[in-house]
Amino acid sequence: MASKTLTTGSILQMEALYVEYTSDRGIAKAVQGVSLELKKGETLGIVGESGSGKSTLGFAVMGLLRSPPARWSGKISFEGREISSLREGEMRKIRGSRIAMIFQDPMTSLNPVKKIGSHFVEYIRTHEPSVNEKEAIKRTEATMRDLGISPSRINDYPHQFSGGMRQRVMIGLALALKPHLIIADEPTTALDVIVEAQILQLLKDLKEKYSLSLILITHNMGIVAQMADRVAVMYSGKIAEVAPTLKIFEEPKHPYTQALLQSIPTVEAGRRVLKVIPGSPPDLTNPPKGCPFHPRCPYVFAMCYDEEPKLLSTGEEAMAACHLLNRKR
Amino acid sequence: MKLGFVEVKNLKKYFPVQKSFIAQLLSKSAEYVKAVDGVDLTLERGDIYGLVGESGSGKTTIGRLTVALAQPTEGLVLVDGVGLFSIKKDQLRKFRKRVQLIYQDPMSSLNPKMTVGDAVTEPLRYLDRAPRDEMKQTVDAMLEKVGLSPPETFYDRYPQELSGGQRQRVVIARALVVKPDYVVADEPVAMVDVSVRAQIMDMLLQMQKELNLTVLLITHDLAVAKYMCNRISVMYLGKIAETGSNEQIFSNALHPYTKALMAAVPVPNPRARTEKKVPAGEIPSALNPPAGCRFHPRCPYVLDRCRVDVPELIEREPGHYAACHLYD
């Protein structure tokens, strides 16, 4: 059976995930019924604009949502074990050592009065109390070599590092406990383009070397095109479309994916005409009824206004949530 | 020699570095961050001129200097033949009508306590002093033009009630309402959602045509420069590495730094996946820039003389300039 490899090869499953935040402007429906699976060794790109719910997904997997202001439901399983109902004490054993996260801004994530090496040593020894100082330093030096940073800089402070080096350190910290799954949330958004390319290459190399599974959260279609095996496109807290990367770029089925691809400028040869997407991304405290993309969709018809489209198969490992798919059949 | 509409000549801006009291006692020589270090630009009327570079390359400082929001350490900026730094104060106020800046971040550049109408009227009040109903008409027309239509539904709203794209439109309306000739747009779409960027870029292109603007577009995003600009200068550490037409820069880049930037951009095409060969390291500090060519420590084609001689920006083919010893 074809699905056999799928079930045995899965490292993470999200089922019917809902997350809401209470704010003074009302209840923001950040994630509305997301089900996703990540295969072992896979790089899954999650693309979306600000407010699409992509970062919330990452926080949910990491068990970093706090109530209040967040409320959530649904099931998250990691390596065959349900983690969404774990107590904080149990989750702490998984967070960092099994699933680790890389955040966008490396400056706010490092302690300015702590040496680079101490970040690693403390982190390792907190999670693995049996490791002595000497061993922790040895592991730190090995990690620094992996990152392309000379171990001689172990006693430097964060401010002595450039932006790119700091982001390398963040990647190193995420890898320090040898996790199996890395969630990288806009890991290069704060960086210049050449450094971005260096960091993406480093992520690729380390993912190979340690056979990691990777969730890459980004708003940049270029980054997913270069990095991901599969792409999930999010809009208004829902998955609009999910498919292998090549299919997303060459045969996008959801009008939002199509529109997005036609609206981004590129440096590739030939000056293209861009297609403008009218309107703005939805307000999560008051998302549109029916299909959330209907106010901006060029193909909108009666059904889209009040009936929410379900994810339908559009090919092998590919799904899209659009009423047009039903109509064509 | 015929002058461009905006002419920048040997522009320099050095920022003194604040030193501790002890350091001041010990040594007298002040240190400077050379943010802009000898830049020449020529913008013809109607150009959308791209100034491209990484953070710390000095592009924003140049933008601010060319609209007289900062004083240079050395050099000239002429707009329509008028020297911005030799003009008298009362004259400068009048001149401000002609040169405007579009700010990057629509959240921090709009006053949250000011309605859209007030925000767009404010520059007119200072620079135009027209009768109230006339100003209202001008503002309404401008709101309509930038796509905040119909104007009366936006006039009394506050920035936080608007979407990111709409806020950026307000910022643009505020700069254009006084009918300037020359506009500096500093990263006009960097903070805008991906699906809204094309709207804003097309609106800016439309405005340029309608108002016959000369635009200096500052961006770190090569794709944005490619889509919008007819001429482009690439900056590195306070100096221009390369200047050319859109075609010349994107089809026949000369400077190794321009090539590196181009190669580094993640292309939204999964079939164009390549091992990225980008230079190691990062843009060094402008406090202590490398001798010779500033790019030499990272350049894959470095020659001996690159470590010593500062390369000049020389015309290598008609209209295409590169500051690189490889082409000498």
Image (spheres, coloured by chain):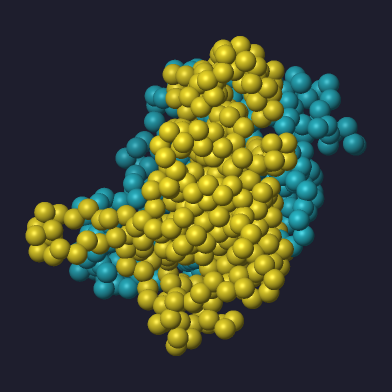
Chain colours: A cyan, B yellow
Which percent across, then down, holds residue A94? 39, 48
Residue B42 vertical placement versus A241 (above, below): below
| Total numbered labels placed on residues in the image | 0
Relative depth, front residue between A257 and B31: B31
User: Which quarter of the figure is the N terminus of chain A placed in?
Assistant: bottom right
Q: Position of residue B169 (x, y in %)?
A: 60, 31
Q: Tell me: B149 left or right of B237.
A: right
Residue extending furthest toward the top: B133
Can residue B74 be seen in this snapshot? yes
Between B131 and A185, the residue placed more toward the observer is: B131
Report x, y in % for residue A309.
Answer: 75, 29
Residue at 40% x, 71% y is A148
Left or right of residue B12: residue A79: right
Query: B214 or A46: which is nearer to us?
Result: B214
Depth check: A317 or B16 in front?
B16
Drawn side of residue A148 relative to residue B229, left or right: left
Q: Is residue B164 visible?
A: no
**Where residue A184 appears, x then y in whole percent?**
48, 51
In which quadrant is the C terminus of chain A drawn? top right
- Give the residue drawn at x 26%, y 50%: A111
